[in-house]
Amino acid sequence: MKWLSYLLLPLGILIGYLIPHPSSAPAPLTDTSSPPPRRNRPEVPSDPARSARILALADRIGKGDRSGEDNSSATVAIADIPAIIERLLSQAGPSGLSWQLQSEIDNMLARWAAEDFDSAFSWAKGYPSANASKDFLEAILEKRAETDFEGTLALVKSLLADDGIRLDLGKELFDTAVKLGAERAFEALIACLSDGYGSSGSTGNFPPGFDFKAFAELSMDFSKNRKGGGSAFSYYPTNVLEEWAKSDTTAALGFYLSSSELTFNDLGDITKSFIDPSEPESAYPWILEQYRNLDAEQRKKFAGDLNSVFPSEMGAAPLLKMVNAIPDPALREQIAKEMFDGFGGSRTGNSMPYLDLLSVLPTPAARLEFLSKSNMRYSISLAPQDKLDSLGITKEQIDALGSE
């Protein structure tokens, strides 16, 4: 759940829960008062003693007091849940609710929805704070996605289309939809797009026989169509290429080389299942075989992402060792140049830890000539001078590159 800091609602909202009401039955799901508030809620019993107990219990829950058997949200009566939640929200500090209180509220809403989904959903949807309403709806629908995927997906779509409420349930819907095939899995992600440009993710649990090619192509088409702006995936599985490569390395590598549109698209994802970074020498034959079989453009992409195969803290060492073992000088220089140039635009966005690769070039003049045409031409001045000294390049020469 992505809880936001809620503005404290007026004390009158809480008091409204605790004043005597003529009945302990839930209020109707429609409110005819004028003006109509965005709220529908069960009423709290009129017994003053019970009202006082509700306040006391909420305060103990808020403080994390578990000294009594009834000091847990699991013991709260369904009819009392709205008042308890109001009280807990009133205890939020400047940075919002603690994760413990968020969890307590989530658990209560899940219990309420399990017993009376329509009432819980209506209350959450009608809650006056839009941010809180969104979070309450997510808490209610998270578990429901596991048992009623179709119904939950329909509700998520209708909330966005009819009410403009965009729920962040991509992971929950995907986990169920992925068992139904590539198209349904992609549909689940599309139902929960974000307005931003970044995607968060975690590993997806793909079933045997999953059609990775269809899923990747749908993702690629979506990414191509949204270039220049528009909604993005709020959630996307991080291990599509990794899991695909386990069943068909050739197909996964072919897709990777032909497209840059997949949300998580590192060469290192493909090699995770069969390359051990702690034993880089075992990877060299596969890497060099693939490189030799690629065309010029594919070679640039492949070489420029080899830093994703080994942990960044290893720096240039494993790659430099591989390159130096190549007997053909021309091929040795070519792959070193493509790696260095590509690393500047890759996931690290920085070739500086890989400056040692330039030692493969035979002379300082050859290194300087390469740098004058490199993607890193204007940022090479940030390189440590001792590194440049080891390559036979002076500060004056680097400064001259930046001024050209």
Image (spheres, grey):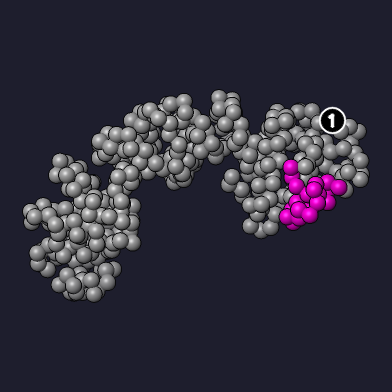
Residue type of the residue flagged with mark 1: Ala
Number of numbered labels in the structure image? 1
Dot 1: few (<14), some (14–19), or many (≥20) neighbours within 10 Å? few
Q: Position of residue 36 (x, y in %)?
A: 75, 33
Q: Position of residue 251 (x, y in %)?
A: 27, 34
Rendered residue at 46%/25% (across/down): 180
Magenta range is 53-74
Rendered residue at 55%/39% (across/down): 168
* 25 to the left or right of 266: right
Relative to 194, say whether 90 is above or below.
below
Along the line of sight, the residue nearer the viewer: 219 or 353: 353
Along the line of sight, the residue nearer the viewer: 274 or 31: 274
Quadrant including the N terminus: top right
* 268 to the left or right of 24: left
Task: Residue 240: name its quadrant.
Answer: top left
Give the structural element (helix, strand or loop) at label 1. loop
Rendered residue at 14%/57% (across/down): 325
Magenta span has 325?
no
Relative to 234, say whether 117 is above or below.
above
Rendered residue at 38%/34% (across/down): 219
Mark 1 — residue? Answer: 25
Quadrant including the C terminus: bottom left
Q: Position of residue 350 (x, y in %)?
A: 30, 59
Magenta span has 67?
yes
Q: Is residue 266 visible?
A: no
Task: Residue 130: name its quadrant.
Answer: top right
